[in-house]
Image (spheres, coloured by chain):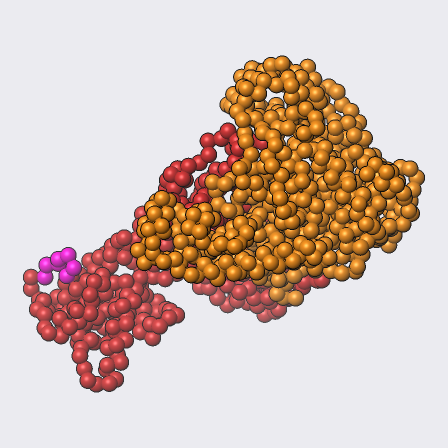
Amino acid sequence: MKNSTKSKVNNVCLSYDAVVIGAGHAGCESALALARTGHKTAIITLDKNGVAFLACNPSIGGTAKGHLVCEVDALGGQMGINADKTTLQLRMLNMGKGPAVHSLRAQVDKHAYHDNMLETLLNQDNLTLIEDEATEILQEDGKVCAVKTRKGKEIKTNAVVVTTGVYLNSRTIIGEEIKDSGPSGFKNAKGLSDSLAKLGYEIVRFKTGTPPRLEKSTIDFKKFEVQKGDTHIQTFSFLTKKANKNTHVCYLGYTTLKTKQIILDNLSRAPMYSGVIVGTGPRYCPSIETKIVRFSDKDTHQIFLEPESARCSEIYVQGMSTSMPKDVQHQMVASVNGLENAQIVRYGYAIEYDCINPLGMFPTLESKHVKGLFTAGQINGTSGYEEAAAQGILAGINAHLYLQNKQQLILPRDSSYLGVLVDDLTMKGTIEPYRMMTSRAEYRLLLRQDNADARLTQIGRDVGLVTDERYNKFLKKMANIEKIKQKCKAIIKPSDELNDYLASVGETPAPNGLSIENLVKRSKVEAYSAIKALGLLKGFKKSELISALTEIKYQGYIAMEKQLIERERKLEEKRLTADIDYTLIKGLRKEAAEKLNQIKPLTIAEAGRISGVNPADITVLLMSINKL
Amino acid sequence: MMIKDTNTIAAISTPLSSGAISIVRMSGPNSVKIADSVFKTKSGLTPSQFTSRMMMLGNFSASDFCEQAMCVVFRSPNSYTGEDVVEFQCHGGVQITKGILATLIKNGARLATPGEFTKQAFVNGKMALSDAEGMMDMINAQSDAEIRAGYNLLSGALSKCAFDAQKELVDILSELEVSFDYPEETIEYITKNNAKERLQNLQKVIDKVLKTSAAGQMIKNGVNVAIVGKPNVGKSSLLNRLLGDEKAIVTPIAGTTRDIIEGSFSINGLRFNLYDTAGIHETDDQIEKIGVDKAKNIIKSADIILFVKDTVNETDEDRNVKNLLDSHKHLIIINKADKLQNCKDTDNILYVSALNGSGIDNLTKRLYDMACEDKHMEGGLTIANQRHIDALSRASQSISDAIANIDTFTLDLITIDLNMAYSALGEITGNTTSEEIIDAIFSKFCLGK
C-alpha cells in the first residue's frame, strides 16, 4: 500500500481532462465520479493525510443527512460504502415516527474512514492524487483552462471542481489565540480566494466550530448513561452485503449550573462575543456559549461522548462546541459530572473560512461566469460531510457531462434531498452554513432512504457511474417490489392466528379474512413486523419488503404529494431564458427584478422559490411571458 | 427580450353625472408628456414643471373647447398606481368630462378597462393581492353594504385572519418538525393530544371566518326574493310597489334565472333581487306548464319566498303552492289588505296593500331581518370573494384531515396535511416559504452539538 501511494502521489502530468481542488468529502466524490466516467483526472490536496478527514464529529448520517448518503450511494458514489466499512455503532433515528423521517446515523472510525477513502482514490484508474496547493484558476474566452499551483506547476485542463471546504483563508480561534491555519492543525489554502473573486464569484465569510476531544482513560463513564446501537443493523449502501457489528457505545450526560456560571463569568473572553469572530455561524450548531446566552432559561445542556476511532483513545464531546480560551475550556469540562479529571487532548476551536455566494452558480453547480468551473461542498456555503459529498458527486457528474458536451444534470426538488439542497442554495442563497433538514423537503414521503435507489440509480446508470453489479441488483430489487405489491392483493384466510395477531396490536378481528394490502393499511399494524409474525411474503429481502409495504401503507399520502408535484411541474415547464432583462418587465417590483437578474432562474417555478420574489411578481411574470 | 412599455391609460374616475366636479385620471409613463400638450397655467407652466402632489389651476385645451380646470401630478413611484399619474378636476358635466377624456386619448392615452388602475397598483407592488381584490370589489360594489364588505377586505381584516392562522400553523409545524430533525434533544416535544387540541382551536377560528362567507356572498350578489302565488292575487303590483318605492335599478344578472329577474332594490344598503313567477297552478296547457316548471326552479334557488294570497282562507290551489315551499324561508303576504278587516300581522303572515302601500315598510324590515339571520353579519368581517372562500375552505379541510388522522398516523404524515393548509392560507397572505418554519425552529429551541 505504502509503495503504491508513493508511486502515484505527485506523479504529475501537465495536462488532465479535469482537476479537482481539495480532497475532502466533496472532492473525493467529484474526482471518483470523473475518473469512473473515463476522464483523466487530478485531485489536488494540501496534505494527503487530510483526505476525507472527519474534522468535526466522528459520525456519518443523521436526520436528512442519512438520506443524502443513500442518495450519493444510489448515484454510484463512495460515501455510503466507506461509512458501512468503518462503522463503530449504528442507529436508525426516528424509528417511532413515519418512514419518511427514518434516518440512519453511524459512528465511524475516523482514521479508518480516511484510510479507506485514500486507498479508494489511489486504486482508482484515471485518477492522480497531487500534494500541492492550487493558487489560481485560469480561464480563456469564458472557459476554464488551467490550474496554477504553489509548487509552480500550470496544469492544463478543461474542467475544474473547487472543493476547498473550510481551508480557504481560514483561521482558527481559541480564546485570544488566533492561528492562520486549517482545521485540526492542517495547513490552510491561500491565494485561491482572490482567483475565485476574479472569476466572478462573490466571496463571503462563514464560521463553524468544534468541541474539545478528551482522553478516554480519564473519563468516569459510570456517571453517564450508555447509548447502545441498534440490534438490527441497516446499511447506507445498497451494495453492502454484510453490515459491521456495533463495537462501541456512546454516552449521554449533561452540563451543569457550574458550567453555565463558568461560561457567563468568562463571556468577555469568548471570541463570539468579544468581536473577534466576524464570520456567520450556523444556528443549528451553536457553540455552548451561544446556547447559554441565547437560551438563558436552560440551566443544563445535554452532551454526548462519542468514540473517535478504534485505534486511538480520543473521545468527541458532542454538544460542547466552543472557542473559549484554553483555561476556560479546562474549567468547563471539569464542571461536568464524570469529567472532573478528564484530560483535554485537543481543544475546541472556531474556524472562519472563505466561501462563495452560491447564487453565483447554476443548479448544475457550474459557475454562471466561467464555463467548466464547478464548486461543491462547504465552499458553497453548506455544512456537513454528507451535504458536501452529495454536491461533490453532482459536480463530478456535471463536469463529466460538460466535458462530453452533453446537457448537464439538474435534480428537481421532488427527486432527492440533493435536489432540494442545490435548489435552495441556487435560488435562495444562504446567510449561514446550510444544513440539510427533513423539514426543507416538501415531498418528504417520496424522498425516503429506502427508495433512494428507485429515485436515482437509473440517473447514475445513464451518466455512466452505476456499475453492472449495482445496476443488476437495482433491477432485481425493483422487480421484486412489483412482485410484492402484486402478492399483497391476495386474501389472507380467516384464522385464529390472524385474529390473535390483530388483537395483539389492538386491531379489530377480521372474521372473513382480509387482503395483505388491507392488513398493512390498518393503522395500528406495523407492516414489516406483521408480515414476519404471520409468515407472509417469504423469499423477499427486508429492504424490498420495506419499500413495497411503505408504498402500500401510505398510498393516500403518497398520492397527495404526487398531486402537489404535478401542480408545481406545470410551472417547471414554463421556461425562462438567461437573456431576459427583468428590469424591463413592466410591473415587476424593483427588488424582484434585481433578484431575478442576479439569479436568472430557468423556470417560473424556480423564480417562485427565490426569496424576495412574491406571488404577485410571479403573476406579473406569467402575464409577461404569455405575451411573448 | 423587450416588453412593450408604453401603456398610458386614462378614465373618468368620478361617476358620470352632472355633479359639481368630475375627475379624469391618467396613469403611465407618458402621462405627464400628454398632460403637457393639453394643460397650461396662467403663467405658462405645464404639468412637467409642477411640483408633485401640488394642485395647479390652469386651462385645459381640447380641440373644440377650452375649460378652466385643476391639474395635479403624482410622480412614480409615489402614486396610487406606482406610475406617473396626472389627474384633472373639471366642472362637472357629462360633455366636458367626456371631452377631456377624449382629448387625452387623442394625444396618446388608452381608455382604461374597469379596475385597471387598481390592477396597475397591484402589479407595481403598491398593494397586496387581497387589498387589490378588496379595492376591485369596492369599485364594482353596487350597494352600500358591498362597499362596507369591500372596505373590510381592503383594511386587511381577512388577510389578518389568514395571517394569524398561518402563524399558529407555523408554530405547530415547527414543534412537530423539530422532533423529526432533532430527535435526541432535551426538548419537551409536542404530544399528539396537544397538537390535536391546538389544531381544533385553529379550525374553529377559520370556520368562524368561513361562516361569514355566506354573508359575503349575499352582500356581493344580493338576496334573491321570489314572489309566488296563484294568478291574480296581485303579485305584479306588489313587485311594482317594492321596486317603485326604491327607484328600481333593473340589473340583468348572469345565470339561469336572468330572464325572470324583475329588478333590484336595496334595504339598508343590502341589495334584493326580485323574481316574479308565473302563477303556479296545476295545468295541462303545455306552454303554461313550462312557466310553472320555471317557477319551481326559482323557488329552489331563492333565499326568501314571498307567498302572496288575497284572502286568509286557503283554497286547494293555495295549498298546492304552499306544499312547494317546503322548508324554504318564506313570508305569507295577504295582499289587498285595503279590502279586509282584522289585519293583524303574525310571525310569518303580513298584511299589505300593494295598492295604497300600507304594510310595505313592515315588509321591507322583515325581509332585511330575515336576510341577516344566521349570516353572522355582526362581526364586521365578511368575505366577498370566492377565491378567498375557496382557499380558506381548503385550509379548513386539510386541518380537519390532520385532526382525523392524528390518532392513527405518525406525526410526520400529519405535517403533509398541515403543509397543505399552510399553502392554502398562503394563497391569501402570499407567504409560502418553508423557511419560516425553519426560522421558528431555531428561534424556539436550543439545538445542536
For the C terminus of chain A, the image quarter is: bottom right
Residue B80 inside the magenta-drawn segment: no
Q: Does residue B214 lie above or below B232 as drawn?
A: above
Q: Considering depth in this image, is A409 or B431 the residue closer to the camera?
A: A409
Q: Considering depth in this image, is B286 or A356 the residue closer to the camera?
A: A356
Chain B, chosen colour in render: red
Tell me where the magenta segment starts and ends, as one range: B343-349
Residue at horizontal 9%, vertical 70%?
Answer: B314
Q: Considering depth in this image, is A552 or A185 the residue closer to the camera?
A: A552
Q: Does residue A500 lie above or below A622 as drawn?
A: above
Which residue ends up furthest to the left in the rendered image?
B342
Q: What secondary structure do most residues of the magenta stretch adopt?
A: loop
**Rendering quarter of residue B107:** bottom right
Residue at horizontal 58%, vertical 47%?
Answer: A449
Q: Does residue B405 lie above or below B247 as drawn?
A: above
User: Can the viewer see residue A611 in this picture?
Assistant: no
Residue B14 x %, y %: 48, 59
Residue A424 x %, y %: 63, 47
Chain A, chosen colour in render: orange
